[in-house]
Image (spheres, rainbow, N blue to C red):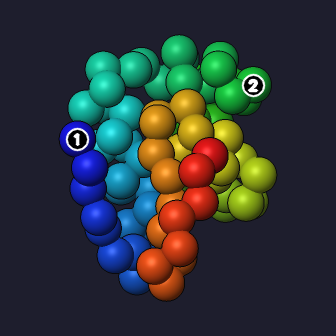
Amino acid sequence: MEYEIKIENRMEIVKLIKQFRELKKISHADLADKIGIKENTMFRIEQGKFSLNAELLFLILKNLGCSIVVEGKEFKL
């Protein structure tokens, strides 16, 4: 299933992370374990209380099976 979503700000990103994680039925603990962070950190990310760097964002999206499209060019993760 493909979705194309235009993201305008940081809070939209964290909301999408939570939505995709729930859609894939992955727990905070499982996703955190896969990307090498604490479960509490994953929870804080989804609450918008933890600033994501590019590396962590890519790890999360990759483990959720997402890709990024920037101005029409797709980046597979």
Quadrant position of the N terminus in the picture:
top left
User: Does the CB distance between marks 1 and 2 fall below 8 Å?
Assistant: no
User: Marks 1 and 2, how far apart in space?
Assistant: 27 Å
Q: State whether residue 39 is above or below residue 77.
A: above
Q: Residues within 10 Å of mark 1 (few under 14, many from 20)?
A: few
> Dot 2 corresponds to which residue?
36
Q: Quadrant of residue 9?
A: bottom left
- x, y (%) of residue 14? 45, 56
Q: Quadrant of residue 59?
A: top right
The tag on residue 1 is 1
Question: Residue drawn 39% across and 75% down?
Answer: 7
Q: State whether residue 71 is above or below residue 44.
A: below
- x, y (%) of residue 70? 53, 76
- x, y (%) of residue 56? 71, 47
Q: Foreground residue, 59 or 51?
A: 59
Question: Residue drawn 76% across and 52% down?
Answer: 55
Q: Decide which of tag 1 and tag 2 comes sooner along the chain.
A: 1
Question: Which amino acid does the dot numbered 2 rest on?
Answer: Gly
Q: State whether residue 54 is above or below residue 37.
A: below
Residue 7 seen in this snapshot: yes
Choose mark 1 or mark 2, whichever is in front.
Answer: 1
Q: Foreground residue, 54 or 11?
A: 54
Q: Secondary structure at mark 2?
A: loop
Q: Quadrant of residue 37?
A: top right
Question: Residue drawn 58% across and 51% down?
Answer: 76
- x, y (%) of residue 26? 39, 20
In this rendering, would 71 be left or right of 8? right
Residue 45 seen in this snapshot: no
Question: Which amino acid does the dot numbered 1 rest on?
Answer: Met
Q: Secondary structure at mark 1?
A: loop
Q: Residues within 10 Å of mark 2 (few under 14, many from 20)?
A: few
In this rendering, would 19 be left or right of 62? left
